[in-house]
Image (spheres, grey):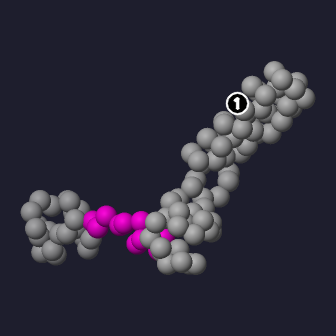
Amino acid sequence: MNCEKCYVESKGAFCSECGTSLTAPEIKTNEEKWGPCPTCNSENIEQRGKKYWFQIGLLSTGIFIVAGFILPILWICSLAGFFFMIASPLLPKIFYCKDCKKAWK
């Protein structure tokens, strides 16, 4: 583990160079990372990021391709889902409360 003061790697509970106490880094819970819901104060929160938006684009592309066999004009709509998949890394991360259904950045 590295010392926070002198950045020397040491083993044990104290730094071998400066004697500073070495502690393990804290693992933050969801509440500590982004806090509770601003509306209902619930801790039942989910973060939606790149993977979520990519899956939405993939699902909409698939639905419009299958529906395009019934009504061919819908194949054009599948392009919108495809572009949504490509743009997913550029879309912002949002937080979503599963209790009151509020979304925020």
Residue 67 vertical placement versus 24 (above, below): above
48, 42: nearer the viewer: 42
Q: Please state the horizontal and vertical placement of residue 104, each as a whole percent of the image.
A: 62, 68
Picture residue at 75% right of the left edge, 38% below the top: 81
Q: Residues within 10 Å of mark 1 (few under 14, many from 20)?
A: some
Quarter containing the C terminus:
bottom right
Picture residue at 65% right of the left edge, 43% below the top: 56
Residue 92 vertical placement versus 99 (above, below): above
Q: Please state the horizontal and vertical placement of residue 97, each as a whole percent of the image.
A: 54, 66
| Residue lying at the far right of the rendered structure | 73
Residue 33 within the magenta-colored segment of the rendering: yes
Q: Please state the horizontal and vertical placement of residue 88, each as a whole percent of the image.
A: 66, 46
Camera sees residue 18: no
86, 68: nearer the viewer: 68
Residue 46 within the magenta-colored segment of the rendering: no
Picture residue at 61% right of the left edge, 41% below the top: 55
Quarter containing the N terminus:
bottom left
Callout 1 amino acid: Gly
**Region rendered in magenta:** 25-35
90, 69: nearer the viewer: 69
Tell me which corner region of the image, top left, top right, bottom left or bottom right, holds residue 59.
Answer: top right
The residue indicated by pointer 1 is 62
